[in-house]
Amino acid sequence: MSAAAAIIVGVAANVRSQTPTSTSARGVPGDSALEARTSAVASQLRCPVCQGLSIQDSPSELAQQMRSLVRDQLAAGRSPDEVRAYFISKYGEWILLAPAPHGFNLLAYALPVLAIVCGGLVIVVAVRRWTAGSTEAS
Amino acid sequence: MNWRRASIAGLFVIPVLGLFIYGLSHDPHDIPSPLPGKPAPTFALEVFAPGQPPLGRPIGDTVRLAELRGQVVVLNFWASWCLACRDEHVTLSEVARHYADKPVHFVGSLYQDTPNNGRQWIAEMGGQSYPSVQDPHTRTAIDYGLYGVPETFIIGPDGLIAHKITGPASARAVARIVDSLLASGTPGKGAP
């Protein structure tokens, strides 16, 4: 299933067996700049065993280990794009909390805007008709 | 009936219904893996449960994927806390014995668990014919895009991931894939 469709139907993976425990101590921050970059990348990656949480926000053991891997890769000199690409190569684009804006995924970005515009138009037309009707009646 | 209004309503309702039907007809737990057809991530992991002769390996030995090139490798991720892993345990052990004289190597990889728990579980389950290794910090599991257990990866002699089985593996499925890889010698994109 594409990431866009996943967003539309409001689903996130909930797997067969997930983690034995849900808490794990976070690593002690060393370099605050590295921590900030880690948080920025981790916030964009989906926790595979949670419902719509990023690995930054999830307390699950797997999320913490993935976050630690993000930190290690950044510390080893990989760019945030390279780290994201690594996770996409393992889990597919599904691992991104926000789908990449291309192809079918564009629907996820376009549909809400389209819905707002169409809803606004319907309201404008309806209000005009009601006011026109009440003006004629008076 | 105002056909114009009905058409406009249909214009909005039909695509939304289409999206709902698409979403509801797909299992959200079934996340397609990008890995089949690609080179298997390498690993070098330490044996914590030796398995049984003739497939066993001593505790502390290191299983290196690179050394298994040319063989079919069945890599099964499991955990003692995983109920579904019980369903496939005996099956995998038996299938591994069946291929004992073939170039097929079964490896179990412990997922988010302790070796002690793993060994105790194996003893409770009546043993395991093939060795199991530990995966510190889950790095190999993440390399294989794991999102739960059990998951089984079948790697061809050419080092490519031929197939991924999500959930308990059946003897028939594993044997069919392994047989096709042994028959073809150089597997392609992967078994269905």
Image (tube, rainbow, N blue to C red):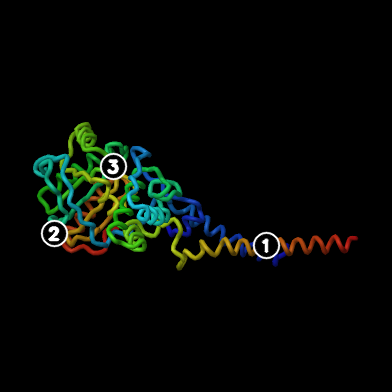
Position of the N terminus of chain A, as image quadrant, is bottom left
For residue B95, above or below residue B8: above
Q: Nearer the viewer, residue B157 or B77?
A: B77
Specify the label residue B131 is tagged with. Answer: none
State whether residue B18 is above or below residue A15: below
> Which residue position holds label 3?
B112
- Residue at 24% x, 50% y is B174
- Given the image, on which type of amino acid does mark 1 rest? Gly
Residue B21 vs residue B75, the one in the foreground = B75
> Mark 1 packing: few (<14 Cα in 10 Å), some, or many (20+)?
few
Residues at badges 2 and 3 in contact (C-beta under 8 Å)?
no
Marks 2 and 1 sit apart, C-alpha to C-alpha, by: 64 Å
Name the residue that disc number 1 marks.
A120
Mark 2 or mark 3, which is nearer to you?
3
| The quarter of the displayed image where residue B130 is located | top left
* Relative image position of residue A16 (x, y in whole percent): 36, 43
Q: Secondary structure at mark 1?
A: helix
Residue at mark 3 shares a chain with residue at mark 1 = no
Q: Chain of mark 2?
A: B
Q: Position of residue B156 (x, y in %)?
A: 20, 58
Residue, disc 2 = B70
Q: Quadrant of residue B164?
A: bottom left
Residue type pointed to by label 3: Gln
Q: Amino acid at mark 2?
A: Gly
| Residue B168: image location, x then y, percent | 30, 44
* Circle 2: element type: loop
Left or right, residue B133 beside residue B81:
left
Q: Chain of mark 1?
A: A
Check disc 2: other Cα within 10 Å, few if <14, some if 14-19, many if 20+: some
